[in-house]
Each structure stands twice: as C-alpha cells, then as structure tokens.
Amino acid sequence: MKLNCDMGESFGQWAMGSDQSVMPWIDMANIACGFHASDPDVMAQTIALALKHQVTIGAHPGYDDKKGFGRRSMQCSLAEIKNLVAYQIGAMQGMCALQGSTVSYVKPHGALYNDMMDNVEIFSAIVDAVASQPSRPSLMILAAPQLQSYQAIANKQGVTLLFEAFADRAYTPQGKLVSRGQPGAVLHQSSAIIEQVVRLAQTGEIIANDGSVLTLKVDTVCVHGDNAESIACIKALRSALKQPLKDA
C-alpha cells in the first residue's frame, strides 16, 4: 500500500511542513499548485526533491484561498471549479516540464476535496478538468463504500480513480471522515495510526467511530509530516507495511 503526503505548502519566507525529512519515506507527493499554498520556486524545489527520491508527483489543487489554507468552501460555479482545477494542473505540468517530469495524478486539497466527495456535480467538474489533460493523470478520491456513480462518471471520461484512506483520521459508519471539529476526529497516538493502517492493509477494513466495520478498497494512504513526532510515525508505518501480511 502506497503512502502519499501533502507537500510543497510553503510560500515565500513562510515554511510549512518538513518536506526534506518526509520525502524519503513516501511514495506519492501531492504538491500544492499556488492557490491554497506554494509559489513557483517552492513548486520547483518540491518537484526536484520528489525526483531525487523517486517519488511520484501529483498536483494538489485547491480553492484560491491562501488565508484559509484552502480549508474553507467557496461559492464557485461548476465552470469556475473546472477552470481553477485545470489552471493549477497546468501550472504544475509546466513546472514539471522544466525538470523533465510530468503530473501523474491529481488530488484536490482541503475543502475542494470534501466538496467533491459531498457533491457529485463538483466531482464531475473536476473529472472534466482532469480528463482534459494530455498526460491523462489519475484522480485521487476518498475511498468509501458507495462510489458507483463516481466510478461511472470517471469511466465515461476515461479517468482512472485512485482510492485513498487517511492514516490519522477517524471514520463515520458511512465511510466519511469525522469532522475536525468533533472530539476524536484526528488520531494523535502513533500506535493507533499504525494499527489502523496495518489493519487496512491486511484486511481492507477500518473500524468506524461507532465500532462498526467498514470495508474499503484502498490504493494509497495519506500521512502527514508536520512535526518530528509525525515523521517518526511515518518511518514506523513504512517499516510496518513492509512486514508480511498475516495469513498471506
């Protein structure tokens, strides 16, 4: 199971995250494209770091909201959403081209990601933007129990979906992420994070916050590397995932 992480979210003199420490331990880098965070120089530096460590490059477009770090929903039309996603993918493609690389996938950021999973029309607009790209990148979305309509839209446009789970987030019985404003929404103990991800890798199951069992198809798990503790957790998680699966 591949690990992905949001990267390149610094801006000018403001540093966010620990990209240098995290990049060697992940498989996929979701690189900010300049709207919710980043700038051309940060994008270039993050792409170079990903290439150095042979990490797959993804575009991480969000709402045009640096002040809110892309975590606030915006009242955009479907055409505006399609355009802002295509614009940011294009920016990342251009920066990748400078270093002989390309965008392999797209993962919307923050509120745009959540809105996509709550509104199939927004998802469809994002699929349109992704499908328009000559390199035919994949689109990363939240793994959930009922995604037939999403899969049908992607299939119609010829867009491959990558299904993602979150290492440090609690889940509702419906397969949604527990809202960050609720107690227990974020797992802080490394042992709990590792237990959740290893169980998912071994069985395809996650225990929801009411104790029920969710069965999910997952291609990749999102991790976060904002501090020394989280980086240590990523290293431990990488080691745990290399162990043979039980009953394999």
Image (tube, rainbow, N blue to C red):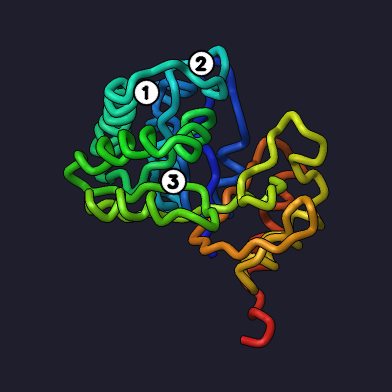
Identify the residue under disc 1: 40
First-in-chain label (2 vs 1): 1
- Is mark 3 in CB contact (under 8 Å) with mark 2? no
Height in image: 238 above or below 116? below
Identify the residue under disc 3: 50
First-in-chain label (3 vs 2): 3
- Mark 2 vs mark 1, CA separation in Å: 15 Å
Q: Nearer the viewer, residue 176 or 83?
A: 176
Q: Nearer the viewer, residue 89 or 73?
A: 73
Horizontal side of 117 relative to 211 (left or right) equals left
Name the residue rendered at 34%, 19% in the picture: 77
Three-letter residue code for mark 1? Pro
Three-letter residue code for mark 3? Ala
Height in image: 157 above or below 97? below
Helix, strand or loop at label 2? It is loop
Name the residue rendered at 64%, 80% in the picture: 244
Mark 3 vs mark 2, foreground winner is 2
Residue 239 coordinates in the image, percent (x, y): 67, 66
Name the residue rendered at 64%, 79% in the picture: 245
Residue 106 coordinates in the image, percent (x, y): 37, 42
Height in image: 146 above or below 44? below
- Mark 1 vs mark 3, CA separation in Å: 15 Å
Residue 126 coordinates in the image, percent (x, y): 33, 36
